[in-house]
Structure formats: C-alpha cells, structure tokens
Image: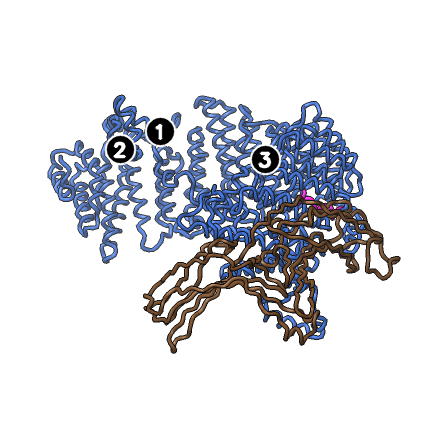
Chain colours: A blue, B brown
C-alpha cells in the first residue's frame, strides 16, 4: 500500500446540520426513556389519582422521582448514620455500658420522659472530668470485709511492702481482704475504678450478689474521703458510674424475674409484680437498710431507688424526702452537696414529677451553707493548701445540677422564690453563680439588672466576681434582657470586667460578653470592647495563652457581623487580628474570616476597605504556606483566596481590575490555583471588554486587551503543572484570537507547542502515578480543533502551526508500545480535511481564517493533501508493524477501524484508491475478530451520510460494506 | 443416679401466722425411677436457749444448756415405700399451724442466747446401699397482731455534760448540747424507728452519731437467770462534724429475724433497746439508752 492519494470530501456543513438535527420527538409520559428516572409507582397514591382523571396527574404526583443515588442513601448517608449511632452510643459506653442493651434502651426512654431540652447528666460528666483534675497522688482504700473498719493490723508494717502487696493480690477481693492502693495518679485512679466496675459486673454475672453489693458499698465509702479535694467532683463522677451500673443491674434482675409469662410493660403497676420478685426486692432494701455507714447506705439506696416501683406505688415518693432528710447527717458540706446532686439526679431520672424533694434538697443545702466557711472546712483547706475560691468552685457542678433539676420547666414564682432565698443568704456568690447558670436564660435576662446589683453586693473574698459576670454573660448570650436596660447592663458589667487583673480571667469573661455586645449593639460598642481586650491582653504578651478565647471572640463577631464593610471599618478589628501571633492560630483565624466572607458576601465588591483588609488577611494565609505545608492545606487556602478574588469586581473600571490582578499575582505567587484563577479572571476581563465593545475594539480597548494577553502570557510560565500551562495557553490563545490579537494568539499557541516535549510521561493524579498519555491526547485534539481557525502567519510557511504540532508529536518520546502518536495522526486528518473546505465549519468573528486567506488556492489544497498522505502513510506503516506480532492484532484492529471511520467521514470515497483503502481497513479491522459489532454498528450513521456522496462507481464498495455490516447486526433493516 | 429433694413453700416470703396452713410441695427430681422406703415430712417449732458463759461461768454454760422448748411438732407420711417415676415429681402437702393445749406460737427470732425457729424436714428412707435423703426448710412465723393499740408517744431527750453518768472527770468534758426525740418507744416492728436529733452546739467537733440496736435476752433456769445485752446492728445517722442546729433524722428499719415483738415468758425474755451514740472527735462516746417495746399490729 504505497502512497495513497488523499482527497477530502467536499462538505456542505449547513445542509448536514439540517439533516442531522434530530426531529423533536416528545416523549410521552408513559414511555420508557433512559434519562427519565425509574418510577416506582406507589400503588396507594396511584389508586386515588387514577379514579379521578388521566394518568398525567398521577405521573405528576409521582414526579418527585427518587434520584437513584439519593434514594439508595435513603436520606441519611451511611457515614452520618454511623456518626449518629456512635454519638448515641458514647454516653452509654462512658456510662460504663450498664447492663446490656435492654437496660440501656430503657434508660434512654427514661431520660426522654424528662424532655430533650433537659441537659442530661452524661453531657456534664465529661465536662466535670476534664475540669477537676489533680496531679496529687490519690489512694483507694477498700476493706472488703464486714465492718472491721479501720484496722490495718499493726503487724503488717513489719512485713515488707512487696510481700504485703503480693499477699493482697492473693486475696484480691476475697472476704475480709483489705486493699489499699497508694500513690495513684489520676489516670490510675480512674482505671482502678473502672476495674471495680468490671469486677462488679463479673460478680453479678457469676451470681455473687453479696460480693457485688460489697464492691458498691466500698466504692461509695470512697466518697466520704475528701483528701485531694480538687479531685472530688471527678471522683464523684467515676464512682456514681458504678452506682448507676449497680442500680441498673438490680432493677434488671427484678424486672426479669417478673417477665416470666411475658415481659412487664413499661408502665407496670405493683399488682403485675409477682411475690418472688417482691420478696427479692424487699431483701435488697432490708440488706441496704442495715449498712452501717451513712454515706454508702444513702448512695446505695438512692441507686436502687427505682426498684421501689416493684413494691408499692408511693415508695419513691416516700423515700425521696427521707433520703433528703438523711443527707443532713453528712458533716462535710462538699460531700453533702454532691450526695444531694446524686439524689436529685436519680430522682429526676426515676420520678421527674416529684419536684418537692428537689426543692427541699436545695433549701437544706442553703441551710448548711454557713458550714462552708466553718472551722473544720478551713482546717481541711489549710491542710491541703487549697485556696478558698478554688474550693468554692468545687461546689459549682453539684449546685448547678441541683438548680438545673429544679429550674427545669419550673414556674416563674418558684424561681423568684429561689432567688429571694438566695438573697436572704447575703447574696452568696457561689449560689448566685449556680442560679445564673441553672435557671432559664430568659429568667435571668429579665432580671439582669437585679443580678448585677447582687453581684456587686457580693463580698470579693470568696468567689471571684468575674466568674459571676461570666455566668451572667452566658445567660444574656442566649436570652435578651429588656431593651431599655441593655446598655446599662453592658456598662455595669464591663466596668467590673475591665478591672479584672489576671489576663486569663479577664479574657474568659470578656469572651462571653462579646456575644451579648454583638447581639445588641453596633460596631461602635464592639470596637470599644475589642480595644479594651487589646489593652488587657497586650502587656507581657498575655494573648499567647489565650488564643482559643480570642479566636472565639472573632468567631462570635463574625456570626453577628456579616457586612464586611462594617466589620472592617471597626478600627480595632485588624489590630485585634494582629494579636494572633502564632502562625497556626493566625491562619486559622484568617481562614474562619474567609469562610464567613465567602458564605455571606453575596455581592461583588470594590470597597477599598474590604479589599485592603481582605488582601491583608489573604496575604497572611498565603504567607503561611511553606515547603512543609500539606497539599490539602494548600488547596483549601487557595480555595479561600480564590473565593475572595471572585468577589472582587470594579464594575466597568476594567483597568483597575487588571491592576488588582497584577497586585494579587504578586501577593499570592506561591499558590498556583490562585494564579490559575487570576489568569481566568483576566481572560474573562478581556472577553468582558469584547462584549462591552460589541466585538469591535477601539484603540484603547485593543491596547487593554493586549495588556490582558500580556498578563496571561507572563503569568502562565510560572505555573509548575504542565497541563494547566498547556490548557491556559490554549485558552488564552483562544481569548486573544477572539479579541483579534493575532500575534498574541500565535505566541500562546507557539508557546504551547514548544512546551509539549516537556510533558512527562506520567503524572500524579490524586496521589497516584498515572500515564499522562490520555491527557496529552485530549489536549492535542483540543488544540487541533482550535487550529482550524488560526490563520497562518504570513512570515512562516503554510500550516506552520499544524506542522509544528505534528513535528512535536513525532519527536515526543511516547511510551513504548503505544499508539498515541498514530492516534494523533488519525485525529489530525479531520482537521486537515476541514481546512480544505471552501467555508469552514466555524470561524471567529472579525478574524480571517485560512479559508479567506487562501481562498481555496489549489496549492494550499495540495499542500493539505500531501500532509494527509504523509500521515496516512505513517499510520499504515504503524499498522503493519502492529500486525507482526500476536498481541498487536487487537490494537491493529482498533486503529484500522478508527482510520476507516475517518476515511468514511472525511475522505472522498469516489476516489478508487481511497475506497479500496477503506475496504481494506474494514477487513483488517475484522480480520482477527477483535472489533466489536457494537462499535461497528455505531458507524452506521456515518455510512448513510457517506452514501449520498458516493457516485455510482463506488456502489459495489458500499454494497460490500453493507453486507459486512449485516453479518454483525441482522436486526438493522435498510 | 442422682436425686434431688427440695421443699418449696407456696408463699415466697415463707411467713405464716397461727391458724394458717403451711402449704407447699415436695419436689423430687431424678433421671430414672427411684426405689425408696418411704418419705416423711415433719414440722417442728423449737425455742433454743443457751446460757452465756459470761453470766454463769464456762462450765455451767457447757453443761447446763437449757432443754429446748418445743412449741409445735407434727409428722406425716408423704409416701409409702415404693417407686418414684423418673423426672420431676411434686407432692403437695399442707400443715395446719395449730398448737396443742395452751402453748403459744412465738414469733421467729434469731438471737444469741434465744432462738425461736420453725422448720419443715423431709426425709426419704432408702435401701441400705443408698444414703437416706433429707431436706430442711425454715419458715417464719409471725405472731397474731396485738389488739391493744397504743398511740405513739414521743420521747424527748436532752444530752448535756450534766446529764451524763458514768464519767470520771466531769470537769474535763467539753460543752455540748444535744436535743432530740424518738417518735415512739413503743414501736411497731414492721415500721422503722423514727425521730430526730439536733446537735445544738458543741465545743469539740463530733465524729459520728449512731443508732445501736441492742437485744436483751434473759434466760431463766434453775440457778436463777442470765441477762445479756448484745448488739444487733449499728446504724450511722450522722458522719463528720454535722451542721449545728440542724435536725438529723433518726431512722432505723428493724431487721427481720433478728427482732421480734418484745417477748416475756416464764422461761425467757427477749427485749430490745436502742442507744443513741454520739462519738466525739477524740473517740469519746456519749450514749443515751432507750428501752423499746416492739409489737406487731
């Protein structure tokens, strides 16, 4: 197959378009259409609709068709479902998985009875554990024997420590054993308690009820030990977990005893409980009533309070006040307060309607308040070297919890009464703090002025005032005080806050009040507050320890101020930002500002204040990028900056926009995606200019457009990604051409061609190394399509760019064993064929393409044909090479078929040689049976297209072709 | 060949009163049919008295253990010698709880020197080669409610250094004032003992306030009688230095089995007392004693 003579088929694009345009066929509603979502008809809804009228109504009723993707996910995607599941799981797990699923479910239900707006204990739990910590050494002292009490045998000191621990390990939790674990760190302590929890469950499971009870008693005894008092609240949390477990175990056991014929309903009454269960339950109560020590007796009875339901209707109602009264016997005020908290917790859980004992608990607590300042407490504090304010804060979880229980859905008068009682106690600060925390924010907000008065009256010595204002601020952040008082409140509060000396306390408090200020006041007040914070936090670089609070200030401001022109007109805002001097925090803050900006800035802006500030912020983000920055981090930063650039618009002032882009390029040179965006912006600018000028540039605009092109031309080389460079060159070339900048367009395209050899053979896509071949093929095809309209440069030869590209393609080191090069050749053929037409299929307005330049000059045409012939020659050579070995045949077939397709569509088959070539190619492609019928059938439309152009001479060829086709697709009728 | 013998009472709490019938089933479970020489069931109620060594001396205590007093005794043949089929066999029974003559059924009481106990005993005699089987099961008797109803009369008390007896040096005592009351000393056994105690003031911190329930058992015998007071239980009602002026509840449940209505017979007496014990910080004890009269209504 020596030289083939190429003749392009003459095309009448207009007519072809007409013919190809498919008839607009309306798809009937009932008809099947692959793009129509599959409708699972709901028979029920159909039923009603059918009766009335035609099916059109029914189809519209079911026209909320489930998108197959979303319907598969069924509303909640599996990930968030897991998250939700684990969220609901965690409290249960941390509550030390109380007694199986049955118990857990019931427990949850129980909590529901209180209502979802009641902050459950489980959420407080973690907070307390995190807040009350200690570095002191702790000890656990367990006497598993019956009341042998404090009798560490004097002889034991003679035995060496090692032997003693060994002996202790031996008896472990056996009867009469004594264990004293000393020098435990806080974590060890928690672990030990958890071990006890486990051994409780094991003992229970192995039917050692007495041992289980002993463990519980010993654990609750630990609560009377107030050494290392700072840890007490956490200890309380850990140990009450065990009590909860125990309570649930006992309840479940008695429950299961009654469930013989069928399980008890949730709302069972005493009559449903059988005698054996009652007797067992009674035994527990008798056993617990005989516990010697007060504290374990109280705690354990409270733990199984719920079991009273099995015995009689009024059991809980009678027990709660009794236990409440019994707590009066606890001497240590802290221990008593926490016991009350536990009782309230159990009470709320088991019998939420019994409010009286909650109130009584609180009043009793008030009654014993004077003890806190008492002699024995003071001695203890001196011994443990704990300051009074710190000691007082230990109370707050307990008191807050009690008050929360009381205040929950409590009527207004009750709360007022509570407040009055607190007032009577001389405005005890600790109490006041808890009241503000626990009562409804609305309630507090309505009386904010009163509260401020009370806070002022408190004596400074005990409880720090900034904590009080903190609590007040927290309430005011959620509820609004009366309009008229707001300013006074802010003034009064800030007067105190600004006097707080310790920067840490100050910022904690200030952070809370920022929200109130943002909610109700304008930028002026917020600005003042920012100034104050700056003043307090700057000395000694105090801000370094308060980044999280300062960040929260920013976050709060951002939630209330979405108008960035207002935001940035606050004088102190940017200086405030300057306080974030640690890089990571600084970037994070900038990032949060940017996120809000992108979310809330809806209109394009040219406000210099915003632009300056945002540029500053973006620059901060950009400057944080270094060699160690992760790819993801870069990407997200770039996205944020891009978001900003997109919002900038100077309207018709294009030149300013361009100069902004110049500035931005200088500022964000390290983030490639930003540069890419800038190039796009500039290209868009050029096109916008063209639109404004309606396609014909004046001298001034032409110069501007050239400036834009220049911008792109010098920016693109700084990108490192070769493919973004290539595609930007192409795009910018197109823009330049559209704007009649011929030489610029030429330069872009030439640059693109010249960097083609640099394309590496493999690139990393999403972290994986992949061959770049397909990208390169895509690009060249794209490029070829563009070349049709690019006029030849007068100083260079005919088809200078096409030849250049093909040369590059030829010289490029393709992968071994790859057909890519030949594929490019195959796809160059249609271009060349199109170039030979009298009128081109598309053109750029106001730009003369080669059609007009050459005007169908035969020399030009023969040049094209020669090129085609060379290409075909190359392709055929390659086909031959492929035919040599076995593996190549499949590729040979495919390649031959694609060339066949091109010939059919673009070649003039009246030419005998070409038609013969086509037939040969067809045979070649089917020789090894690799060509799939489906693919070849798809060429049918092309065949019919070609058919009309064939002269009679080529009829046999067509018949031959068709007969081949018929073998593969007999279902097609001609 | 294993066989298990069990007695199951109908009532879960095993409490019966005089005149009622103690009903239940004997449960026999064996895998294969079982040959036996007869099964019998007996019911017995006994008062066991023991003299404490403290009152009468070690040897007398050893020898002179007082003869048990039988309150009730009856015996029935459940099954004649024969064969029991394999599997689970339940044989119901019923004993009327009636005394003979003028004997009274005292309430079940487990004490130190006095024990009043009722039990059922099932025996299965078997051939020489197999061991005889027997099973014991205690049941509880509550005596008839006492008709005489007494209105609770509160008993007030005040403890100051001056009210104390049995002190060596009154002058060394710290000052304190403790007031309080018991709601009643004539108590219903099924109801808790209640009252309150108030630490009005005290120079020294206190460590604990406890309620000590004490049984006083008196056994009469030929040589005279022995009277012994022992602790049943000790319940702490206040721990640590409690808030002054606050009323602390006194609350104690009378433990089952270890308490019974106050009992006075010709041969023995069972009485109860409660001590309110205040432990001072230096482990000094201040005790106020209250005799109790328990009854069942």
For residue A183, what is the image quadrant? bottom right
**Alpha-carbon distance for marks 1 and 2?**
36 Å
Chain hosting mark 3: A
Say which residue appears at 50% left-offset and 37% top-offset. A677
Chain hosting mark 1: A
Q: Nearer the viewer, residue A14 or A355?
A: A355
**Alpha-carbon distance for marks 3 and 2?**
53 Å
Left or right of B161, for residue B116: left
For residue A507, what is the image quadrant? top right
Residue that numbered label 3 is attached to:
A663
Residue that numbered label 1 is attached to:
A843
Q: Find numbered disc 2 in the image and state the secondary structure of the residue it sits on.
A: loop
Q: Is residue B118 visible?
A: no
Q: Is residue B71 visible?
A: yes
- Check disc 2: other Cα within 10 Å, few if <14, some if 14-19, many if 20+: few
Say which residue appears at 26% left-offset and 27% top-offset. A29
- Check disc 3: other Cα within 10 Å, few if <14, some if 14-19, many if 20+: few
Residue that numbered label 2 is attached to:
A33
- Residue A244 position within the rendered picture, expressed as x and y whole percent measured from the top left: 56, 51
Q: Find numbered disc 1 in the image and state the secondary structure of the residue it sits on.
A: loop
Q: Nearer the viewer, residue A601 or B251?
A: B251
In the rendered structure, which segment of residues is drawn in magenta?
A: A388-399
Say which residue appears at 30% left-offset and 33% top-offset. A42
Q: Find numbered disc 3 in the image and state the secondary structure of the residue it sits on.
A: helix
The answer to whether residue A138 is above or below residue A166 is above
The circle drawn on residue A525 is none
- Check disc 1: other Cα within 10 Å, few if <14, some if 14-19, many if 20+: some
Left or right of A282, for residue A788: left
First in sequence: mark 3 or mark 1?
Answer: 3
Q: Nearer the viewer, residue A971 or A956?
A: A971
């Amino acid at each position: 197959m020596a030289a083939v003579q190429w003749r392009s088929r003459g095309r009448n694009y207009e007519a072809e378009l007409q013919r190809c345009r498919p008839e607009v066929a309306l798809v009937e509603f009932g008809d099947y259409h692959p793009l129509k979502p599959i409708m699972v008809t709901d028979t029920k809804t159909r039923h009603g609709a059918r009766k009335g009228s035609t099916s059109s109504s029914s189809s519209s009723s079911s026209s909320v068709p489930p998108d197959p993707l979303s319907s598969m996910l069924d509303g909640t995607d599996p990930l968030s479902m897991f998250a939700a599941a684990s969220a609901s799981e965690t409290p249960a797990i941390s509550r030390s998985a109380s007694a199986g699923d049955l118990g857990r479910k019931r427990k949850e239900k129980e909590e529901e009875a209180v209502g979802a707006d009641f902050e459950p204990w489980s959420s407080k739990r973690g907070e307390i554990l995190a807040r009350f910590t200690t570095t002191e050494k702790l000890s656990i002292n367990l006497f598993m024997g019956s009341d042998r009490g404090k009798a560490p045998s004097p002889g034991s000191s003679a035995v060496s420590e090692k032997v003693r621990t060994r002996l202790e390990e031996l008896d472990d939790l056996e009867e009469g054993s004594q264990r004293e674990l000393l020098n435990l760190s806080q974590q060890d302590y928690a672990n030990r308690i958890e071990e006890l929890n486990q051994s409780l469950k094991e003992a229970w499971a192995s039917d050692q009820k007495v041992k289980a009870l002993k463990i519980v008693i010993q654990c609750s005894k630990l609560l009377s030990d107030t050494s290392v008092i700072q840890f007490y609240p956490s200890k309380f949390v850990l140990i009450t977990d065990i009590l909860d477990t125990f309570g649930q175990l006992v309840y479940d056991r008695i429950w299961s005893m009654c469930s013989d014929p069928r399980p008890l309903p949730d709302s069972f009454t005493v009559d449903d409980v059988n005698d054996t269960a009652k007797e067992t339950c009674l035994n527990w109560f008798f056993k617990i009533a005989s516990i010697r020590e007060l504290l374990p007796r109280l705690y354990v009875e409270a733990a199984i309070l719920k079991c009273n339901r099995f015995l009689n209707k009024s059991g809980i109602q009678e027990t709660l006040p009794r236990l409440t009264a019994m707590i009066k016997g606890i001497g240590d005020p802290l221990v008593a307060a926490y016991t009350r908290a536990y009782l309230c917790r159990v009470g709320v859980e088991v019998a939420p309607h019994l409010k009286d004992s909650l109130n009584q608990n609180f009043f009793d607590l008030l009654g014993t308040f004077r003890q806190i300042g008492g002699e024995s407490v003071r001695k203890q504090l001196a011994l443990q070297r704990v300051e009074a304010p710190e000691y007082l804060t230990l109370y707050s979880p307990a008191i807050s919890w009690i008050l929360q229980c009381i205040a929950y859905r409590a009527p207004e008068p009750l709360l007022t009464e509570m407040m009055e009682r607190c007032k009577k106690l001389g405005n005890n600060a600790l109490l006041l703090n808890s009241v503000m925390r626990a009562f409804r924010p609305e309630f507090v907000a309505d009386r904010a002025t009163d509260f401020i008065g009370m806070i002022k009256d408190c004596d400074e010595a005990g409880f720090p005032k900034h904590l009080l204002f903190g609590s007040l601020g927290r309430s005011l952040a959620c509820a609004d005080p009366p309009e008229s008082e707001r300013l006074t409140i802010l003034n009064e509060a800030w007067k105190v806050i600004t006097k707080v000396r310790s920067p840490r306390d100050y910022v904690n408090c200030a952070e809370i009040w920022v929200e109130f200020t943002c909610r109700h006041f304008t930028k002026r007040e917020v600005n003042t507050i920012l100034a104050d914070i700056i003043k307090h936090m700057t000395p000694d670089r105090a801000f370094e320890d308060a980044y999280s609070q300062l960040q929260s200030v920013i976050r709060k401001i951002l939630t209330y101020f979405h108008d960035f022109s207002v935001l940035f007109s606050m004088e102190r805002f940017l200086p405030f930002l300057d306080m974030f001097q640690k890089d990571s925090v600084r970037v994070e803050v900038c990032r949060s500002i940017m996120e809000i900006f992108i979310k809330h800035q809806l209109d394009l802006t040219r406000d210099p204040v915003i632009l300056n500030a945002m540029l500053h912020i973006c620059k901060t983000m950009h400057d944080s990028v270094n060699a160690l920055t992760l790819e993801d981090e870069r990407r997200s930063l770039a996205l944020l900056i891009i978001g900003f650039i997109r919002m900038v618009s100077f309207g018709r002032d294009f030149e300013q926009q361009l100069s902004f882009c110049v500035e931005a390029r200088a500022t964000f040179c390290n983030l490639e995606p930003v540069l890419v965006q800038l190039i796009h912006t500039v290209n868009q600018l050029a096109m916008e200019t063209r639109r404004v000028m309606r396609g014909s540039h004046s001298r001034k605009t032409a110069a501007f457009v050239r400036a834009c092109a220049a911008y792109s031309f010098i920016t693109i080389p700084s990108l490192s990604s070769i493919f973004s460079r290539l595609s930007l060159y192409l795009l910018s070339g197109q823009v330049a051409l559209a704007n009649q900048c011929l030489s610029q367009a030429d330069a872009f395209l030439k640059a693109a061609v010249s960097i083609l050899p640099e394309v590496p053979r493999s690139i990393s896509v999403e972290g994986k190394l992949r061959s770049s071949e397909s990208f390169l093929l895509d690009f060249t095809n794209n490029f070829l399509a563009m070349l049709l309209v690019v006029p030849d440069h007068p100083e260079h030869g005919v088809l200078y760019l096409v030849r250049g590209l093909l040369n590059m393609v030829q010289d490029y080191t393709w992968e071994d064993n790859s057909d890519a090069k030949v594929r490019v050749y195959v796809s160059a053929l249609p271009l060349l064929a199109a170039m030979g037409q009298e009128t081109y299929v598309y053109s750029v307005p106001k730009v003369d393409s080669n059609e007009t330049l050459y005007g169908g000059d035969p020399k030009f045409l023969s040049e094209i044909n020669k090129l085609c012939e060379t290409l075909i020659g190359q392709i055929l050579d390659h086909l031959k090479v492929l035919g040599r070995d076995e593996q190549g045949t499949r590729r040979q077939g495919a390649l031959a078929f694609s060339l066949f397709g091109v010939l059919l569509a673009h070649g003039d088959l009246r030419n005998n040689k070409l038609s013969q070539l086509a037939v040969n190619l067809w045979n070649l492609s089917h020789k090894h049976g690799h060509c799939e019928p489906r693919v070849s059938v798809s060429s049918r439309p092309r065949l019919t297209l070609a058919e009309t152009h064939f002269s009679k001479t080529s009829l046999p060829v067509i018949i031959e072709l068709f007969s081949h086709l018929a073998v593969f697709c007999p279902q097609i009728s001609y | 060949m294993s066989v298990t013998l069990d007695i199951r009472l109908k009532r879960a709490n095993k409490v019966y009163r005089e005149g009622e019938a103690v009903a239940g089933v004997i449960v026999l479970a064996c895998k294969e049919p079982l040959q036996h020489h007869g099964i019998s069931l007996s019911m017995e109620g006994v008062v066991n008295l023991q003299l404490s060594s403290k009152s009468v001396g070690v040897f007398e205590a050893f020898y002179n253990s007082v003869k048990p007093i039988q309150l009730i005794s009856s015996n029935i043949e459940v099954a004649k010698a024969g064969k029991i089929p394999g599997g689970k066999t339940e044989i119901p029974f019923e004993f009327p709880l009636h005394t003979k003559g003028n004997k009274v059924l005292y309430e079940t009481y487990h004490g130190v020197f006095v024990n009043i106990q009722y039990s059922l005993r099932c025996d299965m005699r078997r051939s020489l080669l197999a061991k005889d089987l027997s099973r014991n099961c205690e049941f509880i008797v509550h005596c008839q409610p006492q008709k005489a109803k007494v209105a609770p009369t509160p008993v007030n008390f005040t403890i100051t250094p001056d009210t104390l007896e049995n002190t060596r040096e009154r002058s060394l005592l710290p000052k304190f004032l403790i007031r309080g009351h018991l709601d009643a000393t004539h108590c219903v056994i099924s109801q808790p003992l209640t009252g309150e105690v108030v630490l009005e003031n005290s120079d020294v911190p206190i460590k604990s306030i406890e309620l000590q329930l004490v049984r006083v058992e008196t056994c009469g015998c030929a040589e005279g009688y022995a009277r012994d007071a022992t602790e049943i239980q000790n319940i702490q009602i206040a721990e640590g230095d409690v808030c002054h002026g606050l009323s602390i509840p006194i609350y104690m449940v009378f433990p089952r089995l270890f308490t019974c209505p106050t009992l006075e017979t010709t041969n023995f007496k069972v009485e109860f007392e409660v001590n309110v014990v205040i432990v001072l910080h230096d482990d000094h004890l201040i005790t106020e004693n209250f005799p109790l009269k328990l009854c069942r209504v």
